[in-house]
């Protein structure tokens, strides 16, 4: 009795240890998503793309079992900070991504950096993290906030657009985006107008545009603001004489669906577009369309790529995610096929990448969507990298 | 500044003012005559916008949307009046504010439940998509012209109703001295119900018309309630004529603040300072107007009550 019990007990113990070792092992990823609140549209896109990436990777990262913990920030920096503290203290996460707005990125960053958790940003690229407050734990996978505006300014200069009228909401990001445009635009800025955040009626601003007779209008008006601005711009008959230029925040599928036909002919710059011809992108876009029946937005694209970046890094360190130095080195190497065509990190861990110019047209299936025309900025890096001591 | 820009901004200001008038007229009727402070007026406005947008997108007919909005909101107002507002007559204003504020919370959540938290994108009718050239070099959005026409017609209709009908006489009597009107045998209850329904219909009309210009979203009623209350205070509580003049003033001052203040400041200040200061001044213009008016006429421009 005793002799037969002992080996069985040892075997059971060994088995349970083995199981325990496996159960404790999965790579843990914290995902703070803006599923409700003012950034819910971008948040839903990010969530869908992340779920798609997880499915395609079969719930693994680099071939190793992974656990993905999702939570809703409600678009609130305070709530996001609490979620991240829980992620760090209770769940012991190895990677973090998710939030859409810059103010949440700035709120949760210090918690993550203090706990030495790599934060791969799927959208916000605040100038602080690109410059003086840069951190070895922050990876601005998407873009630095000013860069798409710099691409727009560059393109407008290349096109010899003589004068531009600029409009944005009156808050820090609004000023940053218009600042980015002015950095590269060589023509005359006839006016720089700041409206209320959340403003939906632009009659007074449109009249100023008509009176100023600019060659182009550059605007940064995310969400419903941009949707209404474009509609009213066209309804006022301005689209016949004035070229409308913006960034991806007002030129992707969510805005196209809301505005409809009047959005035809809208020019925008972006580090990514759904029609970029590289294989990684085509696979992402077709899988996304198969899963959700629509084209992805740039929110979805960068969220998908954030998971792919983790996948590549875990593969590089052979699952040893506790070796922080090795993980950071692997993340910075970015050993994945980027859906953006060109992509690598600069010293501040923000991208050196191409920026594309798109226009919204009807494609051959009669669907209103973006078409990539040119690359105004090639291998471009942000304006803040010299201030970063990394 | 070119004459064209001036004309266009005046039209913008008058259009916004007429929308405010539709809201404020209902508020001032209800408050001035029934002495009920109805904060839920904005929720009726929101209800009108949602129903109109929903019916317009599913039926394809803008007019059907408008009529449905009026019908549904009138029905809701009828129930609201019978179940709640009726019990508030004669209570103090604090009770009225608390009760009708409660309705706002319920209405916002009900709308979220039915239509979800994302805004609806109402569109102007296709026939009004193209601008009309009202002056050489000034194409103006035809939908905004429609709003101008409707706003003026309603103002005219209310003027005739209040000043040239028997109902209007009772309303005016109630507004200027309620106790005396009751004493003289006015059937107050019935007039009250009618007035409340008329106010609700005006709010629904404003909501349905505003939807395609702004976005139809939860909380839109509270946002517009503040300028509507400013109109009420400037115009003098209970006076439809006062509400009309005050609404046009607020509309013009708000639009001019956004349009001309930055232009004027640019002449004297560097551009960076203008972009800091101009939005602040524009945001304050409406309140500055209110403060100025109240400094000289504490009861508003055309007080209905002595």
Image (cartoon, rainbow, N blue to C red):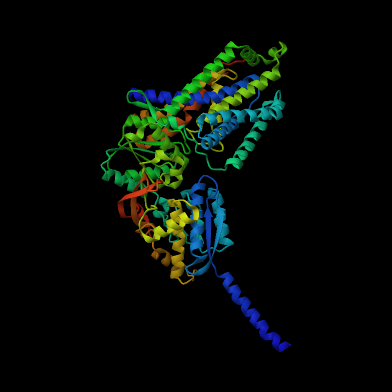
**Along the line of sight, which residue is nearer the eye, A325 or A354?**
A354
Q: Quadrant of residue B273?
A: top left
Above-or-below relation of A334 to A357 = below
Q: Residue B266's x, y, as percent?
A: 35, 31
Above-or-below relation of B168 to B221 = above
Name the residue located 72 percent from the left edge and 12 percent from the top edge. B183
Above-or-below relation of A294 to A211 = below
Q: Residue A225's x, y, as percent?
A: 45, 39
The residue at the far right in this view is A1
Q: Is residue A180 left or right of residue B125?
A: left
**Along the line of sight, which residue is nearer the eye, A45 or A368?**
A368
**Along the line of sight, which residue is nearer the eye, A163 or A278?**
A278
Above-or-below relation of B5 to A57 = above
**Along the line of sight, which residue is nearer the eye, B98 or B132?**
B132
Q: Residue B283's x, y, as percent?
A: 47, 31
Q: Residue A278's x, y, as percent?
A: 36, 59
The residue at the far bottom in this view is A3
Q: Quadrant of the C terminus of chain A?
A: bottom left
**Is residue B233 visible in this depiction of the protein?**
yes
Q: Is residue B235 left or right of residue A329?
A: right
Q: Is residue B4 left or right of residue A322?
A: left
Q: Quadrant of the N terminus of chain A?
A: bottom right
**Is residue B265 visible in this depiction of the protein?**
no
């Amino acid at each position: 009795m005793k002799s037969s019990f002992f080996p069985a007990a040892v075997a059971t113990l060994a088995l349970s240890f083995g199981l325990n070792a496996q159960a404790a092992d999965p790579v843990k990823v914290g995902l703070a998503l803006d599923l409700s609140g003012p950034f819910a549209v971008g948040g839903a896109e990010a969530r869908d793309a992340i779920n798609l990436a997880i499915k395609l990777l079969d719930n693994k990262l680099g071939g190793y079992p992974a656990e993905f913990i999702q939570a809703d920030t409600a678009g609130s920096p305070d709530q996001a900070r609490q979620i991240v503290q829980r992620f760090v203290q209770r769940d012991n996460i190895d990677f973090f991504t998710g939030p859409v707005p810059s103010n949440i990125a700035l709120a949760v960053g210090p918690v993550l950096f203090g706990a030495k958790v790599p934060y791969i940003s799927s959208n916000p690229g605040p100038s602080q993290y690109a410059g003086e407050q840069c951190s070895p734990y922050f990876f601005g996978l998407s873009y630095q906030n000013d860069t798409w505006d710099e691409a727009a300014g560059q393109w407008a200069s290349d096109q010899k657009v003589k004068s531009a009228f600029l409009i944005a909401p009156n808050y820090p990001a609004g000023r940053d985006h218009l600042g980015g445009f002015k950095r590269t635009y060589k023509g005359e800025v006839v006016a720089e107008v700041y409206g209320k955040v959340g403003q939906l009626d632009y009659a007074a601003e449109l009249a100023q545009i008509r009176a100023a007779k600019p060659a182009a209008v550059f605007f940064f008006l995310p969400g419903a603001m941009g949707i209404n601005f474009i509609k009213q711009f066209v309804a006022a008959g301005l689209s016949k004489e004035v070229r409308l230029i913006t960034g991806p925040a007002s030129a992707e599928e969510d805005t196209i669906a809301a505005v409809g036909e009047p959005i035809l002919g809208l020019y925008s710059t972006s580090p990514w577009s759904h029609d970029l011809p590289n294989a990684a992108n085509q696979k992402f876009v077709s899988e996304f369309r198969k899963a959700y029946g629509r084209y992805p937005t740039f929110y979805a694209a960068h969220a998908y790529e954030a998971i792919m970046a983790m996948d590549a890094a875990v593969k590089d360190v052979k699952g040893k995610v506790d070796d922080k130095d090795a993980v950071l080195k692997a993340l910075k190497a970015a050993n994945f096929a980027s859906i953006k065509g060109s992509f690598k990190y600069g010293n501040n861990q923000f991208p050196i990448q191409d920026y594309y110019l798109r226009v919204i047209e009807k494609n051959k299936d009669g669907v209103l969507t973006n078409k990539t025309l040119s690359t105004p900025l090639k291998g471009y890096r942000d304006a803040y990298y010299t201030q970063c001591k990394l | 500044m070119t004459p064209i820009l001036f004309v266009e901004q005046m039209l913008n200001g008058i259009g916004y003012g007429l929308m405010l008038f539709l809201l404020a007229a209902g508020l001032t009727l209800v408050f001035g005559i029934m002495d009920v402070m109805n904060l839920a007026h904005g929720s009726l406005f929101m209800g009108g916008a949602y129903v109109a947008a929903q019916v317009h997108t599913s039926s394809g007919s803008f007019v059907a949307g408008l009529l449905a909005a009026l019908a549904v909101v009138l029905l809701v107002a009828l129930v609201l009046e019978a179940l709640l507002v009726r019990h508030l007559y004669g209570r103090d204003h604090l009770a009225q504010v608390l009760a009708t504020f409660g309705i706002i919370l319920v209405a916002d959540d009900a709308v979220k439940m039915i239509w979800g938290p994302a805004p609806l994108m109402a569109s102007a009718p296709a026939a009004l998509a193209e601008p009309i050239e009202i002056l050489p070099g000034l194409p103006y959005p035809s939908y905004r012209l429609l709003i101008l026409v409707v706003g003026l017609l309603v103002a005219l209709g209310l003027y005739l109703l209040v000043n040239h009908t028997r109902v209007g006489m009772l309303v005016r009597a109630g507004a200027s001295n309620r106790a005396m009107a009751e004493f003289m045998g006015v059937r107050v209850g019935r007039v009250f119900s009618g007035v409340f329904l008329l106010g609700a219909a005006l709010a629904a009309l404003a909501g349905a018309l505003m939807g395609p210009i702004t976005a139809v979203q939860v909380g839109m009623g509270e946002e517009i309630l503040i300028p509507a209350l400013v109109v009420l205070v400037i115009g003098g509580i209970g006076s439809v004529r006062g509400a009309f003049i005050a609404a046009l003033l607020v509309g013009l001052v708000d639009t001019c603040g956004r349009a001309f203040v930055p232009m004027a400041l640019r002449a004297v200040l560097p551009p960076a300072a203008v972009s800091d200061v101009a939005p602040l001044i524009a945001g304050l213009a409406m309140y500055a107007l209110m403060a100025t008016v109240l400094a000289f006429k504490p009861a508003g421009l055309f007080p209905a009550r002595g």
